[in-house]
Amino acid sequence: MKKLDGVPALILCALLWSTGGILIKLVDWNPFAISATRSLIAGVFISIVMKRLPFFVIRRKDGSVDRKATSNLWFAAICYALTMIFYVLGNKMTTAANTILLEYTSPIYIIIFGPAILGEKNKSSDYISVLVVMCGMILFFSEGLESGNMAGNVIAALSGVAFGFCTIFMRNQPADHSINSFVLAHLITFVFCIPFAFITGLPDGKSCLGLLLMGIFQTGLPSVLYSLGLKKVRALTATFVSMIEPLMNPVWVMLFAGEVPSWQCVAGGSLILACICVRAVLSRHRTA
């Protein structure tokens, strides 16, 4: 798996993330219980794959604590945990379309804060890409967008802020340490959500299967792939590629439920994919 990095790892990550809408249909349980159990399974899975237990501080070769690296480790973990928690709360309080659209405003925060934290200077093409992608996202979700609950919209917007900073702080770590931020994030999510987990009883066998699949294939494995992808690409590029996740949702629905997406959905998705492809080609051209 170590040979799989850069854009291919991020594409596979986004595809696996996108299966959440299908797998969650197998689970009849409350959202906090799902989040807690999914994160517990994902954290254990990542530790097994990486063949190590999570660490809470990063040390230098002389044994002293590297405060900067440790801070980035925890900032990334807290931000990803907040992304997952805010996303669950946002979905409960406002429309699904609003929640996804507001979560994927994360490139805006990377554009604003990335240069100062990462030293990755923005290009004119970055600003154009953000504008094109945001237009594509609005078109993609145009039929589902509503004013929604204001508090829910604010919480969903905060998930976008958290996701943006998560990517920044993960990119600001040594490549071999970023995966540990995901393990810590899942641990934080589990601790926060577990008090609310059993208010509606225990899950049945079908739900347990769905939770296992979500923990491993929709959360655990994508976490490993995302950390591998960040080794070779800029934070902004990683966020753009991850937008394949919401684009795949109507594809899965069409394949498994027979629902044909609207022309707005197809047009918006095509615009975003075209932007991602053009950026990938230009990036490869510059590297060559």
Image (cartoon, helix red, strand yellow):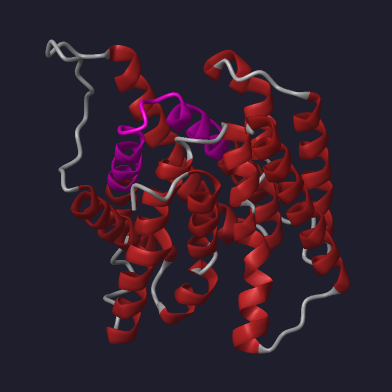
Q: Nearer the viewer, residue 205 or 136?
A: 136
How many numbered discs sit on the rendered protein? 0
How far from the left and from the top, in percent, is residue 115?
Answer: 62, 17
Asked whether residue 176 is drawn in magenta, I would say yes
Residue 265 horizontal side relative to residue 250, left or right: right
Asked whether residue 126 is drawn in magenta, I would say no
Q: Nearer the viewer, residue 117 or 157?
A: 117
How would you classify the magenta stretch by its main secondary structure? helix
Task: Judge whether residue 145 can be spotted in this image.
Answer: no
How far from the left and from the top, in percent, is residue 167?
Answer: 51, 35
Q: Is residue 163 above or below residue 247?
A: above
Residue 282 horizontal side relative to residue 209, left or right: right
Residue 145 horizontal side relative to residue 91, left or right: right
How far from the left and from the top, in percent, is residue 225?
Answer: 42, 50
Q: Residue at x 38, y 48 (%)?
A: 3
Q: Residue at x 31, y 34 (%)?
A: 176
Looking at the rendering, the stretch of residues picked out in magenta corresponds to 162-188
How far from the left and from the top, in percent, is residue 230?
Answer: 48, 38
Q: Residue furthest bottom?
A: 258
Q: Is residue 259 above or below residue 131?
A: below
Task: Judge whether residue 129 can be spotted in this image.
Answer: yes
Q: Residue at x 60, y 22 (%)?
A: 114
Q: Residue at x 54, y 63 (%)?
A: 15
Q: Residue furthest left?
A: 63
Q: Quadrant of residue 204?
A: bottom left
Residue 29 horizontal side relative to residue 248, left or right: left
Q: Quadrant of residue 201?
A: bottom left
Q: Is residue 9 above or below residue 161?
A: below
Point out the image quarter for the C terminus: top right
